[in-house]
Image: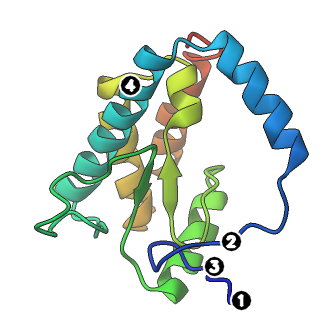
Amino acid sequence: MLANFTPLNGPTLICNPHLARIASTGIVLEETRWHDYASQVVSNARTTAYALREEGIPMRGMHAKNYPEPTYCHQVITNYSREEGIELRDHLARHHINVDGFLRIGTSEITRLGFKEDECRVLGKLLAYLLKKNEKDTAKVGERINDLILSHRTVVL
Protein backbone atom coordinates (compact mmCIF):
# COMPACT_ATOMS: atom_id res chain seq x y z
CA MET A 1 0.00 0.00 0.00
CA LEU A 2 1.35 3.43 -0.91
CA ALA A 3 0.83 6.47 1.31
CA ASN A 4 0.47 9.89 -0.19
CA PHE A 5 1.65 12.63 2.16
CA THR A 6 1.10 15.53 -0.24
CA PRO A 7 -2.17 17.42 0.48
CA LEU A 8 -4.71 17.78 -2.31
CA ASN A 9 -3.22 14.90 -4.34
CA GLY A 10 -5.51 12.17 -3.10
CA PRO A 11 -5.97 10.18 0.07
CA THR A 12 -3.52 10.46 2.91
CA LEU A 13 -3.02 7.60 5.32
CA ILE A 14 -2.31 8.14 9.00
CA CYS A 15 0.13 5.99 10.92
CA ASN A 16 -2.10 5.15 13.91
CA PRO A 17 -5.40 6.19 15.53
CA HIS A 18 -3.77 8.95 17.68
CA LEU A 19 -5.52 8.03 20.91
CA ALA A 20 -4.87 11.42 22.53
CA ARG A 21 -6.79 13.07 19.70
CA ILE A 22 -9.73 10.74 20.23
CA ALA A 23 -9.96 11.69 23.92
CA SER A 24 -9.60 15.41 23.23
CA THR A 25 -12.21 15.18 20.46
CA GLY A 26 -14.68 13.75 22.99
CA ILE A 27 -14.10 16.69 25.33
CA VAL A 28 -14.49 19.22 22.54
CA LEU A 29 -17.67 17.52 21.30
CA GLU A 30 -19.16 17.92 24.76
CA GLU A 31 -18.32 21.59 25.22
CA THR A 32 -18.81 23.14 21.76
CA ARG A 33 -21.94 24.62 20.17
CA TRP A 34 -21.25 22.88 16.86
CA HIS A 35 -23.67 24.60 14.52
CA ASP A 36 -22.37 28.05 15.45
CA TYR A 37 -18.76 26.92 15.53
CA ALA A 38 -18.70 24.98 12.24
CA SER A 39 -20.32 27.71 10.15
CA GLN A 40 -18.07 30.38 11.71
CA VAL A 41 -14.91 28.33 11.05
CA VAL A 42 -15.77 28.06 7.34
CA SER A 43 -16.78 31.73 7.13
CA ASN A 44 -13.51 32.76 8.80
CA ALA A 45 -11.48 30.57 6.43
CA ARG A 46 -13.24 32.02 3.38
CA THR A 47 -12.80 35.58 4.61
CA THR A 48 -9.09 34.99 5.22
CA ALA A 49 -8.69 33.41 1.78
CA TYR A 50 -10.46 36.28 0.01
CA ALA A 51 -8.31 38.83 1.89
CA LEU A 52 -5.14 37.00 0.86
CA ARG A 53 -6.30 36.82 -2.76
CA GLU A 54 -7.21 40.53 -2.79
CA GLU A 55 -3.62 41.21 -1.73
CA GLY A 56 -2.25 39.14 -4.63
CA ILE A 57 -1.35 35.97 -2.73
CA PRO A 58 -1.73 32.89 -4.97
CA MET A 59 -4.41 30.56 -3.60
CA ARG A 60 -5.28 26.95 -4.39
CA GLY A 61 -8.80 26.28 -5.61
CA MET A 62 -9.82 29.91 -6.10
CA HIS A 63 -10.37 29.64 -9.86
CA ALA A 64 -11.54 26.08 -10.49
CA LYS A 65 -15.03 25.70 -11.98
CA ASN A 66 -15.93 22.85 -9.66
CA TYR A 67 -14.53 24.65 -6.61
CA PRO A 68 -16.34 28.01 -6.51
CA GLU A 69 -15.36 28.98 -2.95
CA PRO A 70 -11.81 29.48 -1.72
CA THR A 71 -12.34 26.71 0.82
CA TYR A 72 -15.08 24.46 2.11
CA CYS A 73 -13.53 23.69 5.49
CA HIS A 74 -11.28 25.07 8.20
CA GLN A 75 -8.16 25.74 6.20
CA VAL A 76 -6.85 28.05 3.54
CA ILE A 77 -4.05 26.83 1.29
CA THR A 78 -1.77 29.08 -0.69
CA ASN A 79 -0.37 28.08 -4.05
CA TYR A 80 3.38 28.45 -3.79
CA SER A 81 5.96 25.93 -4.93
CA ARG A 82 7.24 23.62 -2.21
CA GLU A 83 10.59 25.42 -2.06
CA GLU A 84 9.02 28.88 -1.88
CA GLY A 85 6.45 27.63 0.63
CA ILE A 86 9.17 26.37 2.95
CA GLU A 87 11.06 29.65 2.66
CA LEU A 88 7.88 31.63 3.41
CA ARG A 89 6.99 29.27 6.28
CA ASP A 90 10.35 30.06 7.87
CA HIS A 91 9.84 33.77 7.22
CA LEU A 92 6.44 33.68 8.97
CA ALA A 93 7.95 31.69 11.87
CA ARG A 94 10.39 34.54 12.47
CA HIS A 95 7.27 36.67 13.02
CA HIS A 96 5.76 34.09 15.42
CA ILE A 97 3.25 32.69 12.92
CA ASN A 98 3.41 28.93 12.52
CA VAL A 99 2.25 27.22 9.34
CA ASP A 100 3.51 24.21 7.40
CA GLY A 101 5.50 24.14 4.15
CA PHE A 102 2.30 24.38 2.10
CA LEU A 103 1.36 27.52 4.05
CA ARG A 104 -1.92 26.01 5.21
CA ILE A 105 -3.75 28.43 7.45
CA GLY A 106 -6.40 26.94 9.71
CA THR A 107 -9.14 28.95 11.40
CA SER A 108 -10.43 26.39 13.92
CA GLU A 109 -8.54 27.67 16.94
CA ILE A 110 -9.01 31.37 16.28
CA THR A 111 -12.74 30.75 15.82
CA ARG A 112 -12.90 29.13 19.27
CA LEU A 113 -11.30 32.31 20.59
CA GLY A 114 -14.05 34.47 19.07
CA PHE A 115 -12.51 35.69 15.82
CA LYS A 116 -15.13 36.79 13.31
CA GLU A 117 -14.94 37.87 9.67
CA ASP A 118 -13.71 41.40 10.40
CA GLU A 119 -10.70 40.13 12.35
CA CYS A 120 -10.01 37.43 9.75
CA ARG A 121 -10.01 40.05 7.00
CA VAL A 122 -7.42 42.05 8.97
CA LEU A 123 -5.43 38.89 9.70
CA GLY A 124 -5.43 37.93 5.99
CA LYS A 125 -4.10 41.35 5.02
CA LEU A 126 -1.40 41.20 7.70
CA LEU A 127 -0.36 37.72 6.56
CA ALA A 128 -0.25 38.91 2.95
CA TYR A 129 2.01 41.78 3.97
CA LEU A 130 4.43 39.33 5.56
CA LEU A 131 4.20 36.85 2.66
CA LYS A 132 5.23 39.62 0.29
CA LYS A 133 8.35 40.00 2.48
CA ASN A 134 7.83 43.71 2.81
CA GLU A 135 10.16 44.41 5.74
CA LYS A 136 9.41 48.14 5.97
CA ASP A 137 6.72 47.98 8.69
CA THR A 138 7.04 44.45 10.11
CA ALA A 139 7.24 45.74 13.68
CA LYS A 140 3.90 47.50 13.21
CA VAL A 141 2.44 44.34 11.63
CA GLY A 142 3.71 42.32 14.59
CA GLU A 143 2.03 44.76 16.98
CA ARG A 144 -1.28 44.47 15.12
CA ILE A 145 -1.10 40.66 15.18
CA ASN A 146 -0.25 40.77 18.88
CA ASP A 147 -3.24 43.08 19.50
CA LEU A 148 -5.52 40.57 17.77
CA ILE A 149 -4.15 37.78 19.94
CA LEU A 150 -4.43 39.75 23.18
CA SER A 151 -8.02 40.75 22.41
CA HIS A 152 -9.03 37.07 22.07
CA ARG A 153 -7.71 35.22 25.12
CA THR A 154 -10.88 33.34 26.13
CA VAL A 155 -12.52 30.34 24.49
CA VAL A 156 -16.02 31.47 23.48
CA LEU A 157 -17.18 28.65 21.18
Mark 1 or mark 2, which is nearer to you? 1
Q: Which residue is drawn at the image coordinates 42% and 15% (left, top)?
A: 36
Q: Element under label 1?
A: loop
C-alpha separation, residue under disc 2 versus residue under disc 4: 28 Å
**What amino acid is labelled 4 in the image?**
Gln
Residue that badge 1 annotates: 1
C-alpha separation, residue under disc 3 versus residue under disc 2: 8 Å
Mark found first going from the N terminus, 4 or 3: 3
Mark found first going from the N terminus, 1 or 2: 1
Q: Element under label 3?
A: loop
Q: Tell whether 111 sits left or right of 125.
A: right
Front residue of 126/89: it is: 89
Q: Which residue is drawn at the image coordinates 54% and 35% (left, top)?
A: 108
Percent position of residue 53, x then y: 22, 58
Mark found first going from the N terminus, 3 or 2: 3
Q: Which residue is drawn at the image coordinates 61% and 53% (left, top)?
A: 95
Can residue 154 be spotted in the picture?
A: no
Question: Looking at the rendering, which quadrant does residue 12 occupy?
Answer: bottom right
